[in-house]
Amino acid sequence: MISKLFKSRSVAKANLPTIPAGRRVYAVGDIHGCADLLDQLIGLIEADEIARGPAETTLIFLGDIVDRGPASAAVIDRLRGLDATRSDVRFLLGNHEEIFLGALDGEPKALRLFCRIGGRETILSYGMDAAEYDQLDYEAFSQRIEQLVPDEHQEFLRAFEDMIVIGDYAFVHAGVRPDTPLDLQRTSDLRWIRDPFLDHRSALEKIVVHGHTMTDEIERRSHRIGIDTGAYSSGRLTALGLEGTETWTLQTASVP
């Protein structure tokens, strides 16, 4: 009887999703221009790394680092610096980066959408004042943002990835199309999908870690983990830690 009990426990443990031995991952949810919260969370991650001891650590930022919050330019500078000083930092392209890059390329539809979904705050963080923003038409605005956003920021964003797979986890910005293999996913779904993914209830090819859809707290399901806790409005920027079969969370304090 006792031997059967131990066997059932070991089988259950073996079936848990896992990160390969010797590796540790921190996935960071949507930052949305909140440089102060990013600095706080990086501090929490660095302290957590020390407490847990050495490992091959990967930091994954799940996208939507810009828009809505007040300091998108500073966020990009901070992440570029982090990328330069750490051995393994990876970035996923969110729908807000997609629109920002489209606006920088002068795409009319992207320009209009950029201004509707928090791009005003982004471009003000690059030095445009509110009075100028309010006076510009779309053609003039397109010319000004190209002048204001440094080439190195654009190159940084254009190098972002669409999906990262480590062990039994797939990291994406928005989610996946449930009936489509991971290697056949469309980038539009990886950056924009909501209901077909969020309403799905059964197992997927990997446990999907995602942002994009804001929730008050981390949303854990058997097949996905959502970690966009609405940093720009709640003050809670969240990181999910993974090592072996263990998961844990780090989070900045909420706005009072």
Image (cartoon, rainbow, N blue to C red):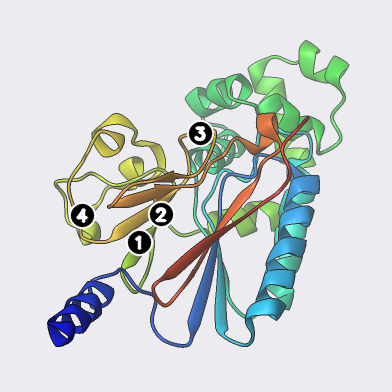
Mark 1 surroundings within 10 Å by alpha-carbon count, few (fewer than 14), some (14 through 19), many (20 or more): many
Per the model, the C-alpha gap separating discs 1 and 2 is 6 Å
Which SS class for mark 3? Answer: loop
For image coordinates 14% across by 46% down, the residue present is: 179
Mark 3 surroundings within 10 Å by alpha-carbon count, few (fewer than 14), some (14 through 19), many (20 or more): some
Task: Name the residue carrying label 1.
Answer: 170
Residue 214 numbered tag: 3
Per the model, the C-alpha gap separating discs 4 and 2 is 12 Å
Q: Are the residues flagged by discs 1 and 2 in contact, CB closer than 8 Å?
A: yes
Task: Name the residue carrying label 4.
Answer: 204
Q: Position of residue 146 (x, y in %)?
A: 70, 39
- Of 40 and 171, which appears nearest the observer? 40
Task: Name the residue carrying label 2.
Answer: 209
Q: Amino acid at mark 3?
A: Met
Q: Position of residue 241 (x, y in %)?
A: 53, 65
Per the model, the C-alpha gap separating discs 4 and 1 is 10 Å
Which SS class for mark 2? Answer: strand
